[in-house]
Amino acid sequence: EKFKPLILSTWDHGMPANDKAWEVLMETGDLVSAVEEGVMVTELDMDNLSVGLQGLPDREGIPTLDASIMKGDGSCGSVAFVRQVRHPISLARKVMEETPHVMLAGEGARQFAIAQGFPMEEEVLSPKAEEAYQKWKVESKYKPIINIENHDTIGMIALGADGKLAGSCTTSGLAFKMHGRVGDSPIIGAGLYVDDEVGAATATGLGESIIRICGSFLIVELMRQGRTPQEACEEAVRRLVAKNEKDIKDIQAGFLAINKDGEYGAYAVQKGFTYAMHHTGGNALLNAGYKF
Ligand code: SD4
């Protein structure tokens, strides 16, 4: 099956994000605004504890955010380890459009946000994040847990009617990470990769395992060599499993891919990875296949 336009997003919260992205795409025809505004919905969702400032904080109790955006012509921008910014995806877009750089991190990213007129939010944890942090502090153990809300990054990839592609990815990262830890989401080629000649891919899950295999870039390259999006996602999971063998029982990671013809695929390490797919016929929540 082939669909054009087509929008794919990770997890259940991909549904409202897709709805918004579709609306923007239909109204404006602007794919970059569609993928930006789509995930902005998730950045504001107070029930989502792994995207946006309401997300679970790092070990010091501070929420720090990662985001990236990319167009199929190779334009891209990202921000990593940024504080006090409500919409890191919009800041990533500003990096793409207003600077000669691809990536800004930490205090520099925050200063750039101020210069661009972004409001600075107070660093107060959301009630749910505060509660979870207080509980975590009792034992203060770092252990990634599969498929609970600390693996709920949103990654979105989209194919326009004109055959152009774009993608976005935004997260508060792993719950209770070390201060300064950066995941896959803001790393072009890890959490997101888009190439108009081939297709697009995005990732969710344990960022370290995804960075190790350049997950999203790998999927796009496999599609370039002739694999379908589904085959490419499965091969990336195989590679990820091989490179993360000793901890694999505790790792969840999932990938989404679209090729430029409008075929798509999804695959995860463990059961439970859902994704939303929007085409002209509507928006649907699907279950990805999985390895274990
Ligand atoms: C990260 N990939 O920072 C993200 C985690 C994730 O919801 O998917 N979180 O490693």
Image: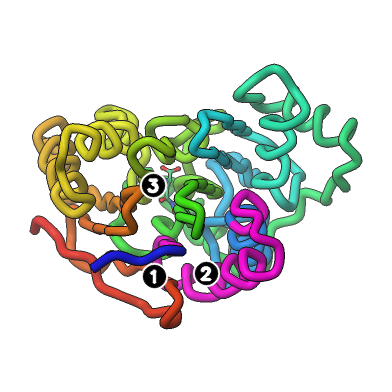
Query: In which quarter of the view is residue 192 placed?
Result: top left
**Residue located at (60% from left, 69% from top):** 128
Q: Counting residues from the N terminus, which is met first, the one under dot 1 or under dot 3?
A: 3
Q: Quadrant of the N terminus?
A: bottom left
Query: Callout 2: helix, strand or loop?
Result: helix
Q: Which residues are magenta?
A: 6-34
| Marking on residue 277 | 1
Circles 2 and 1: CB atoms closer than 8 Å: yes
For marks 3 and 2, give the CA distance: 15 Å
For marks 1 and 3, give the CA distance: 14 Å
Q: Nearer the viewer, residue 127 or 6?
A: 6
Residue under label 2 = 18
Residue under label 3 = 202
Query: In which quarter of the view is residue 3 placed?
Result: bottom left
| Marking on residue 140 | none
Snapshot colouring:
rainbow
Say whether residue 15 is magenta.
yes
Task: Give the vertical position of 51 relative to 212 (above or below).
Answer: below
Instruction: Choose mark 1 or mark 3, whichever is in front.
Output: 1
- Residue lying farthest to the top in this orientation: 100
Measured as percent of width and height from the top left, residue 237 is found at 17, 45
**Residue located at (62% from left, 58% from top):** 34
